[in-house]
Amino acid sequence: MIQKPHADQIYIEALLKNNSKVLSEIYLKFSHKIISYVKKNNGNSDDAQDIIQETLVTIYHQAKEKNFVLTCPFDAYFYLLCKRRWLNELKKRGNNRVTILEDDTSITEEQEQQVEETEIFEQQHQLFELKFKELGAKCQELLKTTFKIKSMEKVAEILGVTYGYARKKKSQCMGKLTQLVKNSSEFHQLKAY
């Protein structure tokens, strides 16, 4: 069943278009709640701004790469994502003391599902980035170029190699990257979702 986009999909579209007016609106409307939560839970304004920024970047990437469609209110979705990100940050810092545990009973199943999809997307994205860095410099250069330019003829021309070599090397590099990802413990944890 395809779900209808929520009216707040405008915020997702604004992120994709880098619409500064609507981005300012997102900060004005939604950031105070997140800043307040972070400050009450062993953080400061800078921490909160980092969390907000990182979360917006993740939503942007998910919208761009996966054609993400928001089916619940942006406020609840964004807040829950930021809150979870902050709790994960506290865990990383070895600070498990959370001062304010809020009642999450008001969170709908739909909101929870959207947040989980975004979190899984982010983990996949981070895993890809991590394993990409393990590739050799030549593979990284070739793949980065093919991500930007879709025409393999153009890629070969830019890199000063033959078309046949560029195609074969791209296939080898993608194969190596796929193996690195599949052989990682993080991949097996993500598959469990």
Image (spheres, grey):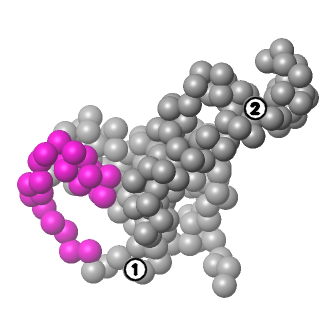
Residue placed furthest toward the top: 160
Residue located 51% across and 72% down the image: 72
User: Is residue 73 among what the camera can see?
Assistant: no
Residue placed most toward the observer, 92 or 21: 92
Task: Say which element carries label 1.
Answer: loop
Kind of residue sitting beneath label 2: Lys
Magenta stretch: includes residue 193:
no
Quarter of the image where the N terminus is located: bottom right
* Number of numbered labels in the structure image: 2
For the residues bearing labels 1 and 2, Cβ distance under 8 angstroms: no
Image-quadrant location for residue 84: bottom left
**N-term-proximal mark, 1 vs 2:** 1
Residue placed most toward the observer, 156 or 70: 156
Residue 37 location in percent, x, y? 22, 54
Residue located 35% across and 76% down the image: 107
Residue placed most toward the observer, 91 or 127: 127
Question: Which residue is denoted by mark 2 in the rendering?
Answer: 169
Where 129 sits versus 161, above or below?
Answer: below
Residue 179 relative to residue 152: left or right? left
User: Is residue 187 among what the camera can see?
Assistant: yes
Magenta stretch: includes residue 87:
yes
Residue 95 location in percent, x, y? 11, 48
Question: Which residue is denoted by mark 1 in the rendering?
Answer: 108
- The span shown in magenta is 83-104
